[in-house]
């Protein structure tokens, strides 16, 4: 049995009830075989076993009082997965589905993603099974304050720097930062990223993940003799990543014809009006169905999780930007049958391993999440730099750095894939390119 297979078996035995975590580890280890073969020294120091075990899992109680005066109790997590190349860095997710397996898969992927950015940041992730939907501003604030009252003892600008993710946007980061500052009694701006512009946030952070996805897509398509101009695009989700992916895709001349939320998807053959989506989602915090009130000619398909129907629409390119495992094997088959020839993962692990294999076998160009959505965390790291300098770059300066980082990430994924015989399998390229730096740092730092 190869070293990677041995480690995979070990991880499966030790984490039997964590399907998402096992899915993420399986994909990575299966692509690392040729790298590990040329580095026999890694096996001698059990490097892969250590890479697959978080440095620390913090799990805590989050009690808070709702608007009816009732006590509510949620679970809180912070996984500090790997700090070999820098302070732990990764978002906070507030969603009822959050559990330890989901937190661990996200933190594990973050290790490779952060390494790919070329910036000095380790991997972490956190969150809660708190459901922000339907909660008042007051309840959101109380929850965030209670969450931070515990989390604050585990984070810091040189130690662990959280940001947003599903259910955690500018409003939540504001409440979290306020409580941190109040408890710690110092202005440590670099402890959280995704902050508002009046208190240490970076221009272009809000746009960064979606824009970065499109910069990566532009490079990937260019390397394969294609481009975005005039192409029909499907984008799942209508949150932070989806909205700014749609904006940049439209700027590149593509036509975004469908978007979704967890209740269903809209189809607008004339191209989605993003101003309407921003109003519904960023201002009114309503359901995507409302789009029909503004554009009656559009169509709405309701379903139980928001990604049953969207992948059945004919298009050239699919950008999953909602959540994990939204493209199943069946969905991948439908996409291919309908002529989709490129997929760009804005969400984390949106494609099941079976679906990834199917897409690659059918010559679909696949931009893997670890690389393609790294623009968010890269710009978070730029926010940390600005906080350290007590200085702000302009939108254009940050955006240009982001573009440079994404272009470089694509180049590194391409070169790693080619070097190890994976052709234009950028999933393998991303895993290998991300792994090399972390492995090297772990090896240099001894048995930690
Ligand atoms: P948001 O909370 O802003 O938006 C999530 C969107 O996905 C919403 O439209 C949501 O609909 C929809 N959705 C559909 N089904 C689900 C489901 N089962 N679970 C959760 N959401 C669902 O999140 P983001 O846009 O920030 O994040 C989207 C994805 O991108 C996630 O996978 C995240 O990890 C990843 N990502 C985000 C980064 C960032 O900078 N924000 C950086 C890198 C990756 P509804 O409102 O109805 O729930």
Image: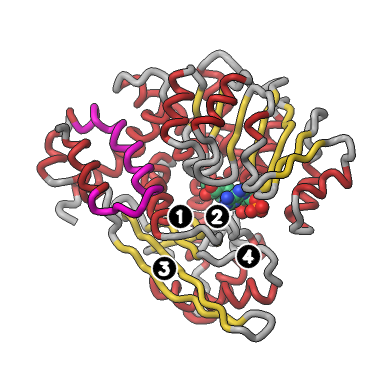
Residue at 49% x, 70% y: name it: 188
Secondary structure, mark 1, is strand
What residue sits right under mark 4 in the picture? 132
Secondary structure, mark 3, is loop
Image quarter of residue 197: bottom right
Q: Earlier in the sequence, mark 3 or mark 2?
A: 3
Q: Which residues are magenta?
A: 13-36
Q: Nearer the viewer, residue 65 or 159?
A: 65
Residue at 73% x, 25% y: name it: 253
Residue 26 shown in magenta: yes
- In the rendered structure, the answer to whether residue 114 lies left or right of residue 177 reads left
The reply to whether residue 120 is in sight is no
Secondary structure, mark 2, is loop
Q: In the displayed structure, would residue 176 be above or below residue 313?
A: below
Q: Position of residue 132 (x, y in %)?
A: 63, 65
What residue sits right under mark 1 in the picture? 90
- Residue 71: which disc? none
Q: Give the spatial CA distance, label 3 vs label 2.
A: 17 Å
Judge the density around disc 2: few (<14), some (14-19), many (≥20) Cα neighbours within 10 Å.
many
Judge the density around disc 1: few (<14), some (14-19), many (≥20) Cα neighbours within 10 Å.
many
The colour scheme of the drawn protein is: secondary structure
- In the rendered structure, the answer to whether residue 83 lies left or right of residue 46 reads right
Q: Give the spatial CA distance, label 3 vs label 1.
A: 12 Å
Q: Are marks 1 and 4 in contact (CB under 8 Å)?
A: no
What residue sits right under mark 2 in the picture? 165
Q: Earlier in the sequence, mark 2 or mark 1?
A: 1
Q: Nearer the viewer, residue 48 or 389?
A: 48
Image quarter of residue 115: top left
Residue at 60% x, 59% y: name it: 167
């Amino acid at each position: 049995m190869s070293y990677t297979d041995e480690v995979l078996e070990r991880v499966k035995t030790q984490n039997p009830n964590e399907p998402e975590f096992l899915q993420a580890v399986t994909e990575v280890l299966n692509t690392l075989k040729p790298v590990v073969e040329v580095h026999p020294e890694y096996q001698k120091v059990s490097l892969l076993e250590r890479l697959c075990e978080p440095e620390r899992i913090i799990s805590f109680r989050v009690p808070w009082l709702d608007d009816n005066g009732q006590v509510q109790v949620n679970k809180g997590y912070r996984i500090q997965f790997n700090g070999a190349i820098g302070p732990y860095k990764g978002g906070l997710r507030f969603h009822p589905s959050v559990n330890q397996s989901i937190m661990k898969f996200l933190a594990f992927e973050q290790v490779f993603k952060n390494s790919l950015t070329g910036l000095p940041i380790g991997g972490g992730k956190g969150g809660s099974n708190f459901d922000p939907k339907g909660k008042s501003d007051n309840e959101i604030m109380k929850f965030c304050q209670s969450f931070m009252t515990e989390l604050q003892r585990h984070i810091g600008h040189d130690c662990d720097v959280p940001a947003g993710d599903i259910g955690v946007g500018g409003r939540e980061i504001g409440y979290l930062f306020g409580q941190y500052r109040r408890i710690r009694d110092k202005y440590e701006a670099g402890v959280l990223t995704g902050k508002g512009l009046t208190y240490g946030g970076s221009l272009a952070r809000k746009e960064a993940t979606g824009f970065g996805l499109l910069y990566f897509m532009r490079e990937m398509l260019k390397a394969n003799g294609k481009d975005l101009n005039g192409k029909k695009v499907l984008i799942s989700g209508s949150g932070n990543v989806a909205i700014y992916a749609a904006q940049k895709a439209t700027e590149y001349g593509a036509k975004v014809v469908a978007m979704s939320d967890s209740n269903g998807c809209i189809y607008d053959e004339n191209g989605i009006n993003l101003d309407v989506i921003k109003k519904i989602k960023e201002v009114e915090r309503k359901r995507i169905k409302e789009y029909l009130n503004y554009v009656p000619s559009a169509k709405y398909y309701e379903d139980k999780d928001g990604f049953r129907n969207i992948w059945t629409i004919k298009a050239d390119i699919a950008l999953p930007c909602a959540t994990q495992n939204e493209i199943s094997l069946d969905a991948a088959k439908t996409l291919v049958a309908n002529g989709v020839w490129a997929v760009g993962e804005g969400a984390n692990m949106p494609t099941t391993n079976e679906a990834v294999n199917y897409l690659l076998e059918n010559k679909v160009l696949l931009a893997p999440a670890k690389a393609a959505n790294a623009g968010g965390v890269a710009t978070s790291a730029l926010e940390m730099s600005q906080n350290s300098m007590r200085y702000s770059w302009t939108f254009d300066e940050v955006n240009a750095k982001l573009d440079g980082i994404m272009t470089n990430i694509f180049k590194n994924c391409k070169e790693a894939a080619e070097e190890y015989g994976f052709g234009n399998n950028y999933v393998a390229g991303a895993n290998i390119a991300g792994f090399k730096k972390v492995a090297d740092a772990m090896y240099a730092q001894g048995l930690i």
